Amino acid sequence: MNPDRLAARLRATFAAELGDQVRLMNRDLLALESAPADPATLKSLFRVAHTLKGAAHTADVPLVEEVCHNLESLLVEARDGSRLLGQADFQLLFAAADALGDAGERLKTERALNPSPLADFAARLRTGRAAFAGPGPVAAPTMPPAPPAAVPPKAEPRDDRLRVDPARLDMLLASSNRLLAARGRFLSRPSEMDEVHDAAKDLLAGWRRTRHHLRTIVASDDHRTAELVEWLDERMMGLAQQARRLSSAVASDARILEQIATPLLDQVRRLRMRPFSEACEALPRAARDLATAAGKEVALDIADGGVEADRVVLDALGEALLQLVRNAVDHGIESPDRRVQLGKPRRGTITVRAELRGDRIVVTVGDDGTGLDEASIRARLAAKGQQAPAGRYELVRALLEGGTSTRSEAGRISGRGVGLDIVRAAVERIHGRLEVDWDAGRGTTFTLVCPPSPASIRAMLVRVGGEIVAIPTADVGTAVIVAADAVRRAAGRDTIASVDGPVPLLALGTLLGRGFAGAASNGRIAAVVVRSGGGRVALAVSELLAEQEVVLRPIPGREGRFPLLSGAALLEDGRAALVLDTAAVLEAAGGAATSGDESLGRAAAASDGRRKWRVLVVEDSITTRTLEQSILEAAGYEVATAVDGLDGLRSLQERPCDLVVADVDMPRMDGLALCRAVRASPQLKRLPFVLVTARESAEDRARGLEAGADAYLGKSSFDQQSLLETVRQLIG
């Protein structure tokens, strides 16, 4: 290999390794700051410096090699017990980590390291080596240090990852998305071939009836006509046989394609999936530095829940989380003395939690600080000449639009009113939504909801006039079919009742504008309740179609022409659908959107004074879930829903119900596992349990009943009456 190419390759490899090692360095420094004499952490940190020094020598990056050699000198003294690391040492070590991190970014883009923060840092060490020269004072420990053998060494994580150019992964994903569309189109071919086969059989049967009459008409000496009849007879029979063989072959090929394509597409997507923890790598260091600068004490608690997401999603989440943590330290957490006065612990707590709920990632960032100061925010809005919003939803919307701050002056960390606008933009970039809740004096919680991958999302398909519109499932609260006379006028707007109170009802066709017809007027209204940023609105549509995974595509020149659309979607059958931008719809709905503060719907539901039987519907398909919910609610039952078994189990633990209706095939926890968990619970074991599933063989039915189900309904023979009759038999 050419020496120059080899050198460039070594430097590129080293740049990637440098980034990984700096992350480990920050992790160890944060741990060491709490326990400066911990031998396992010191050993791990020394290993990082030593590894980087050797790698820098190999890649011919002398500046990194020099700095890491000096770091080794300090860490050896601390490791051998001749020096107890103090505040000045940690300032120096954290500064070294920052300089090395900057050097890694420069190497990735082939920029020079001289001048750079690392070069400045190395110069400081050369001119003032006192920080690393000789042993420093050792403070007498309150307890003798444990012998090294008593502290198990940290297990080094094994990294079996293969580094791949992200551009190649993007190309692979684009090809797999085209395969997804092709698979969807091909899977419809067996039914089309069945129709061709049936038509050929009908044609053959008709021909045979006609052939008998032709033979009686044709004169016995008309050999040419007789031969023509026999030729047609053979061709008709051959056509029917060929149609049968082709229909069987297409059906077989479709099954094979489904067996191969589905896992292949899943694996291609997983190539881009990374642990959620990667989006949180910068948070501990940022929280530590900001708290130190502000004179505050902050504990950061992160739980990733084993969640994984596409790297594009993680990049956006990382940007949003960093801003939210900065805001929490600067705006939310009070000073230690103030917290003591308020009866709180001196140290404030910031929590970051991630979990997978159905087909979406839910991330919460909360703090136990002051909460949002509504009066101050309204005052700042008024000072800018804006009308101060009255409701919480409008206040949240004003905050998320940016330019609003509770600070009277801009500080180094925040105060210019752009932080939440950055968060909102990052979340919307990955087709997510942002919600805010707070309790004055007790804290603030931000909730980020997004799909794991931006390339394809689960969406509910609806028809609006002659168009198909896809609504991201992450933004769908529920779908309903209500009688037209159930629509009520409240505060000058149409509303429909829901479990969470009245919801404004708007025609999606009207919002989308010219070319889109309104909802069908047949005495019943189909509507989808969508939510974003704390607001909700019901969108009336012509028809509810289905729920499926769709491949996203941009619309060229969309801005200005289609403000309520985020793009287009390629459906499984090859057709195109328009993807709704839920946040923009809520914005366009304006004052019609409601945060659910009203309780009219709840009051109406309980107005007859009788207790309603409560049924929990557990189903991952929003279409089936909506159908079952509508049937049960129309029969007078109170219905709660869950998107999979784990969600259903959590719902049962939070609030009991009288009966469970569950699907079998669901992600995370299926219906059989949920049924077994219910039967194993002393509190829930007598709860009636109904399985509704497409698995209808005798063996599947036996497994369902063995799991403890009281009834097992097949979806192929499923109808409204069978479900209601089963529920009535079990609970009345």
Image (cartoon, rainbow, N blue to C red):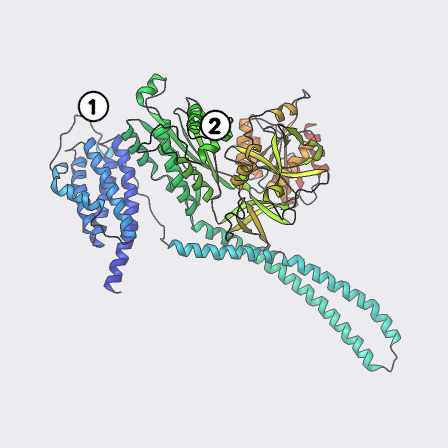
Residue sitting at 70 percent across and 62 percent down? 196
- The dot on residue 142 is 1
Image quarter of the N terminus: bottom left
Name which quarter of the figure residue 483 lies in. Answer: top right
Residue sitting at 71 percent across and 62 percent down? 197
Q: Find the distance from the CA under tag 1 to the CA under tag 2.
A: 57 Å
Residue 504 visible in this rendered orientation of the protein: yes
Most foreground residue, 313 or 553: 553
- Residue 603 position within the rendered picture, expressed as x and y whole percent measured from the top left: 63, 23
Residue sitting at 23 percent across and 39 percent down? 95
Q: Which residue is mark 2?
A: 388
Left or right, residue 327 beside residue 618: left
The amino acid type, in three-letter code, at marker 2 is Ala
- Residue 648 position within the rendered picture, expressed as x and y whole percent measured from the top left: 55, 33
The amino acid type, in three-letter code, at marker 1 is Thr
Image quarter of the C terminus: top right
Left or right, residue 632 beside residue 29: right
Q: Are marks 1 and 2 in contact (CB under 8 Å)?
A: no
